[in-house]
Image (spheres, rainbow, N blue to C red):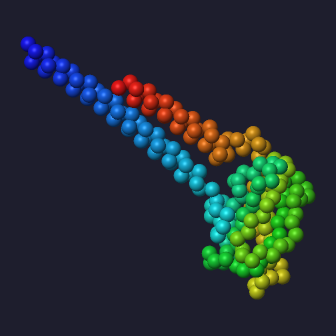
Amino acid sequence: MMEILCKQCNNNTCLVQRLSLNTKTRSGIFLVCICALIGAILDQLALAPAAYAHFYGGTTVSVDGYQVTFVPYPSKPVAGDRSTRLNFSVLMNNSDIYNVYAALTIAKKGQGGLAVSTPYKLFVFSDMTIPMVINETGDYNVTLFTLITGSKYGSHPLTASFDLVVVSPVQALFSDRVILVIGIVIPTAAGAAVIFVYLWKKK
């Protein structure tokens, strides 16, 4: 009789152990999936344009054998924001050009006159970053003028124009990557941790 009870007890113990193992396994798989999701989001956040070398992404136009790339950062600047950077690369056969002079104008579409006009400035490399503050929201036309020493554009500038959208702080909230981290990644991680602890204690 005692042997039967012991066998039943052992069987029940094994069943409990199997259930606990299944719970742990499910919890582990769930946690791995959440970590993979967070990792994928963070990978996307790491795609912000680099502040060195050539600028990639954005918009590129070809003008008489030159490639001119415009990469604003952020991609939709916020009106009145002093952290806005307008990044340009002027390349010849994907190579830098040295000692160029560049000037910039920004005009709001549908209105006369210029919102911004900068004087010519010497850049040792043709990968250029220009800090900028644009005070009003709207659609703008950005024109870069580049004087290239030793070329036909040494006396009159190579000209390239681009579109730029300036948004309000409220509009920027929906596209800001830092806000996405705060609003999506952190709550997701916290929720995953709560569920993981719950499943672990439930075993």
Classify the position of the N terminus by image quarter: top left
- Vertical placement of 58 versus 12: above or below? below
The reply, left or right, for residue 182 in relation to residue 101 is left
Residue shown at 83%/79% (left/top)? Answer: 156
The reply, left or right, for residue 25 in relation to residue 84 is left
- Vertical placement of 96 versus 162: above or below? below
- Vertical placement of 188 versus 6: above or below? below
The reply, left or right, for residue 42 in relation to residue 17 is right
Foreground: 94 or 107? 94
Q: x%, y% of residue 41?
A: 54, 46
Q: x%, y% of residue 46?
A: 58, 54
Residue positioned most to the bottom: 150
Foreground: 59 or 83? 83
Report whether residue 31 is seen.
Answer: yes
Q: x%, y% of residue 101?
A: 80, 76
Tell me the quarter of the picture where residue 19 sits: top left
Residue positioned most to the top: 1
Q: x%, y% of residue 152?
A: 77, 84
Classify the position of the C terminus by image quarter: top left
Tell me the quarter of the picture where residue 65 sits: bottom right
Residue shown at 72%/51% (left/top)? Answer: 76
Report whether residue 65 is seen.
Answer: no
Residue shown at 85%/50% (left/top)? Answer: 135
Tell me the quarter of the picture where residue 59 sits: bottom right
Residue positioned most to the right: 113
Residue shown at 48%/34% (left/top)? Answer: 192
Please state the total of marks drawn on the protein image: 0
